[in-house]
Structure formats: structure tokens, C-alpha cells
């Protein structure tokens, strides 16, 4: 299968999940996750109309951005954010999905160049409470406090919540986890936040994510094939 055939399949999967969920497909953005794949594959997907790409490793991403400079790509940072990486992320991405502390949000705001629009942020939630995983506790009042503070930072725009759930072996459990994310978003919005984004759903669980209200699915393998 070629990248364009794969993309078509993923687009169709998103369409049919939206139909099932009675949602408009305009409300779900596909972020093509290109980590560990070469710039030429990104170019091929871009030429087929894919505009949003997600990268996990900063140096690898910066190299590809240089090679693809002339393309009008919207770059999403979806890897773990260490403090010493915030400046380059603030300078070179449109979105950061994996913010898990106020300190990181503050650094990104301080380091976002003034001539760029605000950096779009999602707070990463450790929704299944896994010990090994980064992300914030799904504690409503702690999250509300953090979100309200982050919303006031000048050079970022807090857009929503993101998660990487623990693997599940059935659709009901997938749906239950994603529904918890939706409930958190609703809670924050009921208390004055203005979050329009839920970044959730990967190659294997797009349907459940869209059913629960995902607005951004992050798909790698189903588009680009296995990673090296
Ligand atoms: C790698 C990655 C993806 C894509 O995963 P696939 O299983 O290849 O679709 C999505 N989100 C994050 C945060 C990732 O690191």
C-alpha cells in the first residue's frame, strides 16, 4: 500500500466514525504522526492534501522542518517535553500536545516569539493513572486551577486535553476511557474554560475516540507503515 492509499483509508475511517457518532467530519483533524519516517514521506502525504503532522523527537523534527521549509505544514509536537527543549518547540511548532506542568506552559509562553501567533497547547492527562506514563492526574479541581492559570499566559492558547490511554482489549473499555476525557473537558468548560480540543485516538482506536468527542486523532502506523 502507498501512503496516499493509506491516507485515503484513514480518512474514510474517520468519515465513517463521524457518521456513526452523528458528528461532522469537519470537527475532527487528522494529525499524521511522522516520527521515525523520512521527510520524503511527509512530502508525499502533504502533496495528497495532508497538512498537519506530528513529531515526537525534537532534533529529528527540526531536521525535517528544514528539508520541508517551503511547504505550508502545521507542525504538532507530541513527544515528552523536557524543560531544555521548550525554546525550540516554542519557536518551531504550531501546537504542543504534551504539556504536563504549569512550569512547561510558562516556559513555552515566555519563549514563544512575539511575531508568531500564540502556541496552541493541550494538557496531557494520564487518564488511566499509569505509573510509567507522564501526564497530569485526572483530578478535576487541580486541573481547573492549572487550566485557569495557563489560560492567562500571553503567548500560548490553551486549546484542550490530550491522552495516550493504556492499551485496551475491547471497544467498551476504550470508549469508557475516552468518555472520561470528554467529561473532564466538559467540567473545565462549565467552570469558565474555553477548551475546543480533545487530542485522542490513534491507529487502533479512532472509532471509540471519535464516538466520545475527539477533535484530533493522531495516526502514524496506519499512514506511514511500521517505524524503523
Ligand atoms: C507514535 C504516536 C502516535 C501514533 O501512533 P500509531 O500507533 O503509529 O498510530 C500517536 N500519538 C503519540 C503521542 C505518539 O507518540
Image: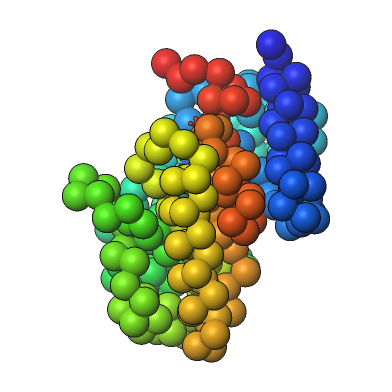
Between 122 and 182, the one lying in front of the other is 182
The image shows residue 129, relative to residue 137, as above or below, that is: above
Q: Quadrant of residue 95?
A: bottom right
Quadrant where the N terminus sits is top right
Q: Residue at x 66, y 43 (%)?
A: 30
For the residue pair 39 and 197, the one nearer the viewer reads as 197
User: Quick check: can you spot residue 180?
Assistant: yes
Q: Position of residue 127 (x, y in %)?
A: 36, 57
The color scheme shown is rainbow
| Front-lying residue, 105 or 22 | 22
Picture quadrant of residue 27: bottom right
What quarter of the picture does the C terminus occupy? top left
Instruction: Tell me which residue sits at (34%, 82%) in the image.
Output: 141
The number of discs equals: 0
Q: Residue furthest bottom?
A: 192
Would you say 3 lies left or right of 206 here? right
Query: x, y percentage for residue 50?
Result: 73, 37
Q: Is residue 71 left or right of residue 92?
A: right
Answer whether residue 73 is visible to the viewer in this image: no
Question: Where residue 121 sits in the image (x, y, percent)?
Answer: 50, 64
Q: Residue furthest left?
A: 131
Residue drawn at x 59%, y 63% is 197
Above or below — where is 228 with respect to 161? above
Residue 150 locus on image (x, y percent)? 42, 78
Q: Is residue 48 left or right of residue 97?
A: right
Give the residue at x 44% y 53%. 177
Q: Is residue 3 above or below residue 195?
A: above
Amino acid at each position: 500500500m502507498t501512503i496516499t492509499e493509506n491516507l485515503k483509508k484513514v480518512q474514510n475511517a474517520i468519515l465513517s466514525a463521524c457518521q456513526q457518532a452523528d458528528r461532522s467530519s469537519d470537527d475532527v483533524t487528522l494529525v499524521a504522526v511522522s516520527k521515525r519516517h523520512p521527510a520524503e514521506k511527509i512530502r508525499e502525504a502533504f502533496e495528497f492534501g495532508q497538512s498537519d503532522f506530528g513529531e515526537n523527537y525534537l532534533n529529528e523534527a527540526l531536521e525535517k522542518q528544514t528539508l520541508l521549509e517551503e511547504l505550508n505544514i502545521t507542525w504538532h509536537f507530541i513527544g515528552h517535553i523536557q524543560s531544555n527543549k521548550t525554546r525550540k518547540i516554542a519557536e518551531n511548532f504550531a501546537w504542543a500536545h504534551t504539556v504536563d506542568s504549569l512550569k512547561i506552559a510558562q516556559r513555552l509562553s515566555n519563549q514563544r516569539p512575539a511575531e508568531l501567533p500564540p502556541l496552541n497547547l493541550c494538557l496531557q492527562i494520564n487518564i488511566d493513572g499509569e505509573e510509567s506514563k507522564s501526564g497530569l492526574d485526572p483530578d478535576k479541581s487541580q486541573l481547573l486551577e492549572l487550566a485557569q492559570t495557563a489560560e492567562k499566559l500571553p503567548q500560548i492558547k490553551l486549546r484542550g486535553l490530550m491522552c495516550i490511554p493504556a492499551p485496551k482489549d475491547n471497544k467498551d473499555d476504550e470508549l469508557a476511557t475516552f468518555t472520561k476525557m470528554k467529561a473532564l473537558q466538559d467540567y473545565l468548560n462549565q467552570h469558565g474554560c474555553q477548551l475546543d480540543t480533545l487530542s485522542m485516538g490513534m491507529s487502533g482506536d479512532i472509532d471509540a475516540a471519535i464516538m466520545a468527542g475527539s477533535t484530533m486523532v493522531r495516526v502514524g502506523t496506519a499512514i506511514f507503515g511500521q517505524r524503523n
